[in-house]
Image: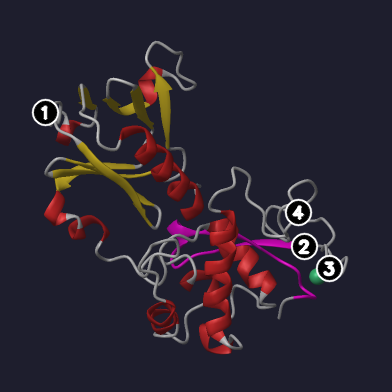
Amino acid sequence: MPEGDTVYRTAKNLDAALRGDTLTRCDIRVPAFATVDLTGDTVESVVSRGKHLLIRVGEHSIHSHLKMEGSWHLYRHGTKWRRPAWQARAILETDDWVAVGFELGVLDVVARDDESSVVGYLGPDLLGPDWDADEALRRLTADPSRAVGLALLDQRVMAGLGNVYRNELCFLRGILPTRPVEDVDRPERLVDLAQRLIDANKDRVERTTTGSLRGETAWVYRREGKPCLRCGTRIEHGELGDTALELRDVYWCPRCQS
Ligand SMILES: [Zn+2]
């Protein structure tokens, strides 16, 4: 699943290509918005809010979320798409570009002044210009008995973290993801590290949490059964979620984390 850094970069690329230009085609292929046609309107900006993307066109915002399989691609007119056409959910064209949103997990169109209806619930945006570490800390510690591994994924606490970062952050702070938030030593450091880690990756195509881009790019994520890069102990794997339907993979070193 794409993390906030991927969405941030997607927004930046779309913004650079589309900003200020008029849509010459607007094809939204989800039933509820199939009749929406913003052709002739100007793309004002493209921004990310956590893992959400907002393409602001005229008086509207095209809101999307990549979920598990989604992606936005930019093509020059007449070039071959890298994903099959039947996966396209939105096609936006300008004189210079064709922007295609494939398999978007969420896609809707809202009035510009109603963006809060789709992103208003989000916590401070880790990569936003209005990032607020104090507010993120307040939200993180508001439910002291909650597992820290769940709180980190909760977009109402901080917006932008996905499963890679929540696992890596727990390792880097030496805490098991199942531990309650109240057991986290200096939680403000966890918030600070989350922001620094995702910020360091926001302009890279390949993500790393170890500082290495050639060798191992993660300490624990998807490394179950392999030796811990710090102590050599085998990395463990399990699942964690608020409910049985929301289970997500967790990875940890039983020696480095407690
Ligand atoms: Zn270890």
Q: Amino acid at mark 2?
A: Ile
Provide the residue span drawn in magenta. 236-256
Q: Would residue 219 be counted in the magenta stretch?
A: no
Alpha carbon distance from label 2 to label 1: 50 Å
Sequence-wise, the earlier of marks 3 and 1 is: 1
Q: Is mark 2 in CB contact (under 8 Å) with mark 4?
A: no
- Is 184 positioned to the left or the right of 66 in the image? right
**Mark toward the viewer: 4 or 1:** 4
Q: Which mark is residue 35?
A: 1
Q: Nearer the viewer, mark 2 or mark 1?
A: 1
Amino acid type indicated by mark 4:
Ser
Calculate the distance from the C-alpha at mark 2 to the C-alpha at mark 4.
19 Å
Question: Considering the numbered disc 3 on the image, is that residue within a helix, a strand or a loop?
Answer: loop
Residue shown at 15%/43% (left/top)?
60
Residue bearing the label numbered 2: 235
Work out how far the residue at label 3 is from the one at label 4, CA to CA, in angstroms.
14 Å
- The answer to whether the residue bearing label 1 lies less than 8 angstroms from the nearest atom of ligand 1 is no
Residue annotated with mark 4? 212
Q: Earlier in the sequence, mark 3 or mark 4?
A: 4
